[in-house]
Image (cartoon, helix red, strand yellow):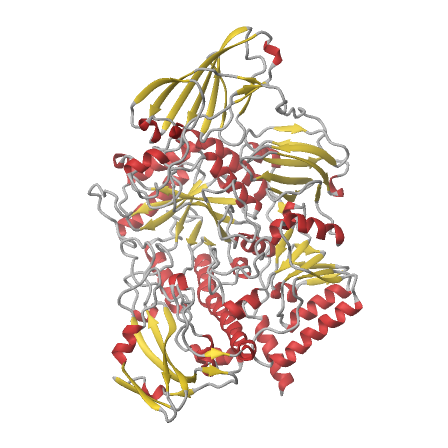
Amino acid sequence: MKRLLLSALLLIGSVFYSNGENLPTKSSFSKAKGDLYETFKNPGAQYRPFVRWWWNGLKIDKDEIARELDLMKEIGIGGVEINSIRFPDGADSLNYQSKPYLSDEWADMISFTADACRERGMICDMIGGSGWPFGGEFLPRNQQLQMLTIETVKVDGGKTGTDFSIRKDELLARVNPPIASKNEHPLKELVYIRLMPARVDEFTEGTSFDSLVNKDQITVQVPAGEHVIYFFVKMTGYMNVINGAPGASGPVLNHFNKDAVLAYLSRLSDKVHFNDPSLKGKIRATFVDSFELEGANWCDGMLEKWEKYFGYSLYPYLPYIIKKIGHMGNPLPENYGSTFSEKIKKDVEYRVRNDFERFQIYLFQENFINTLNDWCRKNGVQSRVQAYGRALHPLESSMYIDIPECESWLWQDVGFKLTENRVIGEGHGFSCNNKFTASGSLLAGNGKVSCEELTNTGNIYQSTLEDIKITGDMSNISGVNHSILHGFNYSPREAGFPGWVQYGDYFNEHNTFWPYYHYWMDYKARVSAILQNSIPQSDIAILPPLEDMWSVLGQQRDPFPENIFPAYAHDLWQNLHQNGNGCDYVSEHILQQARIAKGKLSFGPRTYQTLILLDVESLDPKTAVAIEQFVKKGGKVICIGKRPHQSIGFADYEQKSLTVQSVFDNLFEAYPDRIVNIPAPTLPQTEWFAHVQKELDLKPYVKVDKPVKWMFYNYYKSGDKDIFFITNFNRQCSYQVNLSFTDAVRGKQAWLWDAETGKRYLLDQDGSSMALRFGPAESKFIVFDKLKTGKPYQALPLEPDSVRLIGKVWNVQANHVDGSTQTFEIDSLVDFNTLPFVWMKHFAGTLSYTTTFRVDDPNAFRVINTGKARGVVEVYLNGEKIGTHWYGEAVFDIRHKLKPGENQLQIKLVTPLGNYATTITRRYASSMEEIGLQGPVRMY
């Protein structure tokens, strides 16, 4: 009987995220049409950054829509995502009237915008609702989000027992989870009452008092001793849409209810006729934003559905797994409920919670993701979804999406800090879920990875183009190849500065950097053109301990998990790429369905020679058997930290755990050269992995002589081309590296493809090796192909020990964005915040520094380096513009530009808006930064 139950449960486990089918794969990645270099030189709209276009408060007008599209086109934006959202707090509406979501007027604006994008050669997406998660005031109660939560009361029955009484209305009033987006009028239903011992050393389901749930006055007879009464309350419609637009700002949709989801989507397609000849093909995709469901865990018929899938009842175990919920759905850390012994935690609580978390994923996939995809196919649009967060599998959910999306944030410390085992966001632009999303797309044979990029809800006016570049490069290293910028605020011309600002980096015509954004847009388009038309190479698969995390902590709120499990969970892939290897995350189902032969493990188009188990303790026996076959057929397995020794889930766990432990005991004994257990990483982790790489003979795609945490190496193939995207995230330091590339490049010529200009140059190489310098915030594409002739690359000279300093006296003209101008003279280059110039402390605009100097031999100098500054730097020599630098070292080639005798040097510095913005608005303008050219300016 146990063997039959085990077989049934294994079968159930294998279908959890795939509705009874294998995980999706396509036969191959899409391939570039035509010559890759030509695509790189002149990238089309599909490669250019898109923007999330916030239609603020739906106070929209056709003339303004057309004007803003022209503005976006002007700076190189390739497409838009129409995003209906609430009106920003504190903004002046200028008496514009809203066109509510799903109104005829709103639908007309959608159609007009789709036509206007097509006319301009731009691409149009639209959000599939409003705000996040989807919902609206039109939802009937039975279509609203549900959560089962608890209120607990500790009662001491003394020596003889006692009664505890409470009015039901008083009890329900206590149940008020402190979530972020609260609906003040939820439906609260008391559904179960359970009396539990205060201390649980042996399993008990407690004593049910469910017969009292409909009583106005509830009285529970408590026996002798200390006990806890659990009151289970089902809340329906407890959460409101975050930033919902007029007409879609009410309760959140129940994403676990297929009929509700279909009804919600159908309201949209009934109003926006995607298949109508006038609109067909003009909207590429519908977008779904963050699934921040704030504790959603329930649906009608939950217990029956559970028992059908698992073969045992959830009801007895509710006190062990249901938690009180707080901000963003995180469990409250308060001391409440019964205390469970370690044995009960391991044998009951953790195992049932593992099943509970996996069941949420199944329900979400079945009822929301599958329904959405069917609806998208019916309406001729693609699905573009941020398929992460609680109730979604971090990796597998992205495999079902046409354009899976992740998220990268613009933090102010980017380029200055890159903390290991970090606090979320500390120096890292990419979010924890980015590598999961990219891996899922690759494993599905898709390859497209979009990103809500440069998300900025902080000090949005201080961002420089250097901040933007570093954050964007971090996105690309994490697997992103399609950028959706966060974002562009619909704001009429007459709204002025700052205008209608909802979120996002201040991509606006009033920004001082507006004339310069095209530099980054062109650069980013060329990067995406290569990455969308090439395949990332990875021969190492990483299995993270998701099941162990779910068992102990539950699912986390991506992209900002409250807990990182283990501490280095999101750093390991970085350590590999810092040392020239390539990797993907995999899941247990990937391993179970993989093809295994000749020491390789393959799924879809991806193939791996090494599998890393990252502190994994628990596995499905099917996964253990798949790993066993991989090792027996020549594969290499590295267990970091812990080694697998137990099963996942609750049913028949003793027997399944014995199977897992037996498999690994036998493997370690029989194949010590193919499976090893090494300690968890030590700091610094980049150097730690360099040692592991050498000791375990993990062949990198590019061998780095001096790996540092700031330098990342990604390897791609496109046809017969081998492509390496190498980037330095440090905005202060440069690095000289000696690189030896994979044997795959032997016999090919190395080229530098310059993503800023679209030009390519021959590189000097010694076979497959070369030395390269990377300046601060600098990235390079190194491309190996069969083309042998072209223009050689000539690097600018490095700074010698002896340089010529320029500028004893500077005449400065300060042109403020408010129209005012001041001129003055300074004898040193400093941050103006350090000088008694009150007017300059809040400056934003263009600072023009002019000085003169003499040279005897114009050929003695090749470059001018203008030194430290925040902003965009332009240099003019003797009235001729030499160039523009918008990130990194401001080094300008001055060959043939100097003349004997006196020369005039003018340096223009365009500053961010931030310091000035603090005098206009406190919303997203909170800090003061350095202002001015700080030099030193030098020639060599």
Residue projecting furthest to the bottom: 160
Residue 384 seen:
yes
Measured as percent of width and height from the top left, residue 906 is found at: 45, 17
Viewport quadrant of the N terminus: bottom right
Q: Quadrant of residue 744?
A: top right
202 is higher (above) or lower (below) than 175:
below
Residue 645 in the image: above or below residue 885: below
The number of numbered badges drawn on the structure is 0
> Outermost residue toward the left?
95
Closest to the observer, 365 or 566: 566
Tell me which residue sits at (34%, 18%) in the image. 823
Q: Answer with the quarter of the image where residue 745 lies.
A: top right
Residue 492 in view: no
Q: Is residue 823 left or right of residue 532?
A: left
Residue 897 in percent (x, y) is at: 55, 13
Asked if 619 appears above or below 848 in the picture, the reply is: below
Residue drawn at (39%, 92%), measured in percent from left and top? Answer: 159
Picture quarter with the C terminus: top right
**Nearest the camera: 103 or 920?**
920
382 vs 618, left or right, is left
Seen from the viewer's position, the closer of residues 413 and 99 is 413
* Relative image position of residue 50 (x, y in whole percent): 44, 42
Q: Residue at x 36, y 46 (%)?
A: 503
